[in-house]
């Protein structure tokens, strides 16, 4: 969206910083109601 939309370097930096700062502290794996994603980490390069 941002890259293809022609965002400036500053706009990209602001977007990425916002993503990092608003990321959840945990993934919730040990929480009740956690649902395993359809793809394992190895399928997405993790």
Image (cartoon, grey):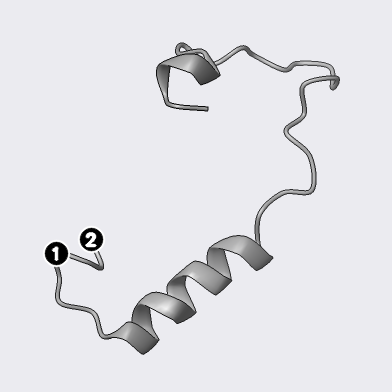
Q: Residue 5: image x %, image y %?
A: 15, 71
Q: What is the quadrant of residue 17 in the picture?
A: bottom right
**Which is nearer the eye, 44 or 33?**
44
Q: Mark 2 = which residue?
A: 1
Residue shown at 44%/78% (left/top)?
13
The answer to whether the residue labelled 2 contacts the one labelled 1, judged by CB atoms less than 8 Å apart, is: yes
- SS type, badge 1: loop
Q: Which mark is residue 4?
A: 1
Indicate the secondary structure of the residue bearing disc 2: loop
Residue under the point 53% across and 20% down = 41
28 displayed left or right of 37? right
Q: Quadrant of the N terminus?
A: bottom left
For the point 72% across and 33% down, which residue is it? Answer: 27
Q: Is residue 13 above or below residue 22?
A: below
Residue 22 - label:
none
Q: Is residue 12 above or below residue 43?
A: below
Give the side of residue 4 with respect to residue 40, left or right: left
Towards the viewer: 25 or 33 = 25
Residue 39 at what x, y percent from top left? 45, 13
* Residue 26 point in image, percent of width and height: 79, 39
Badge 2 density bin: few <14, some 14–19, many ≥20, Cα 10 Å = few
Q: Nearer the viewer, residue 12 or 23?
A: 12
Q: Residues within 10 Å of mark 1 (few under 14, many from 20)?
A: few
Q: Position of residue 22 (x, y in %)?
A: 65, 62
The vertical placement of 14 against 35, above or below, is below
On screen, residue 5 above or below 33: below
33 on left or right of 6:
right
**Number of marks present in the image shown:** 2
Residue drawn at 72 percent across, 49 percent down: 24
């Amino acid at each position: 969206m941002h890259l293809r939309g022609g965002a400036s370097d500053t706009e990209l930096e602001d977007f990425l910083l916002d993503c990092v700062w608003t990321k959840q502290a945990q993934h919730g794996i040990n929480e009740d109601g956690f649902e395993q994603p359809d793809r394992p980490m190895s399928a997405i390069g993790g």
